[in-house]
Amino acid sequence: MNTVDTMGTVDIVLAGARGHGRWHLENIRRLQDKGIVRLAGICELTPLTADELPEGLATPESTPEQSADFGALLDSTGARIAVICTPIPTHTDLALEAARRGVHLLLEKPPAPSYAEFRRMADGVAAAGVACQIGFQSLGSHAVPAIRELVEEGAIGELTGIGGAGAWARAESYYRRAPWAGKRRMNGVDVIDGALTNPLAHAVATALALGDASRAEDVTRIETELLRANDIESDDTSCVRVTTATGLKVTVAATLCAEDPDEPYVVVHGSHGRITYWYKQDRVLLQRAGHGPEEYEYGRTDLLENLVDHVTDGDELLVVPEVTGAFMKVVEAIRTAPDPTPLPATAWHLLPDEERRVVPGIDGLVAAAADSLSLYSELGAGWSNPHEVST
């Protein structure tokens, strides 16, 4: 079991330590092993058992305090940073509760279920003078500035558009993992837990970032097509096309009903080539006229580590709320669009062994949308309704 010299470390409270929160527990342990942070507290409705804590997080010298009261836990631990990985509708209130105490934040994506809640969070955090990092881990990849530099150098000619593709699979049990899973609203409160806004949100945010359209004011038009094969409220098969202030088209297609799930990616289209970025792998493929294909792999700066370095040494934050404004405009367009259209029973089938629904042909449609910057209806998908437009 590891022990850590806590001198000079930053105390952290984690809110939401189950589900995706387990990833944060492991990451905090990694940073604690390096002597950078100490897990001072865990906020969960039901305390974690000893078996749920990664080895090394609780030591004879230091055991994380546990409480269901987030504010009280921040007060009792004196934590300088809070990591918030709780249900989407709770993000804004918890972020502001931390900000009022002067506690800096790593807030999981999506930062809020509506643009109004996002603004309430971002404005409140700014007024409190605390740092806030939004958990789009792909934007910490060193591939992002490298791709931007390739585009600026003219490696693929004139930038003509950005595509994003995510063909993933989720079992029917995925939508039973929590009361809010697969919901658009719950008890009158927005949730908006859809394919583009939660599991494949990175594809949207990364595509917008590579199109130099990260801020709210960079978006002028949003078209959506939202569908579902599963018996849920939200979309599990959807696409969105954003027109930016410069006239660039950014199209992202996603499904959680893939036939053969694969790594999601963003493709940067140019007049003389293209750059494909598999953002979970930090892998880049450059294809351009007059050259053979060139493949690169990049490192990644962890967003919590970057936040700690900002708090202690003044390093620049990588993903401040304002650079997720365009993504939140997409969330808002999806929130205000008509409820997703159920796919006809003939458009999907159940894989009994995996207990998941599959839409035949969807993998190719997702790839074609990213390649052509088209929506499903424009690609001849018979089950897709004409798109909704938000301006």
Image (cartoon, rainbow, N blue to C red):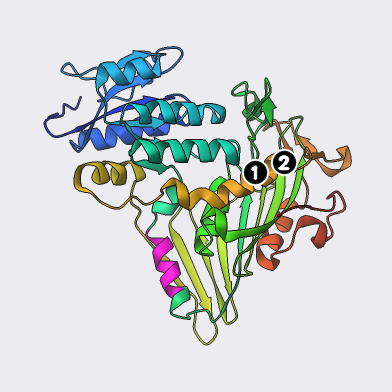
Residue bearing the label numbered 1: 332
| Numbered range of the magenta stretch | 142-150
3D distance between C-alphas at marks 1 and 2: 6 Å
**Percent position (x, y) of residue 53?**
34, 21
Vertical relation: 315 (above or below) 14: below
44 and 222: which one is in front?
222
Quadrant of residue 130 in the image? top left
The label shown at residue 336 is 2
Residue type, mark 2 in image: Thr
Q: Do tag 1 and tag 2 residues touch (Cβ < 8 Å)?
A: yes
Residue type, mark 1 in image: Glu
- Can the viewer see residue 265? no
Q: Is 149 a magenta residue?
A: yes
Q: Left or right: where does residue 390 sit relative to residue 4?
A: right
Vertical relation: 132 (above or below) 239: above
Residue sitting at x 85%, y 50%: 385
Residue sitting at x 61%, y 38%: 114
Q: Left or right: where does residue 329 sit relative to residue 5?
A: right
Helix, strand or loop under label 1: helix
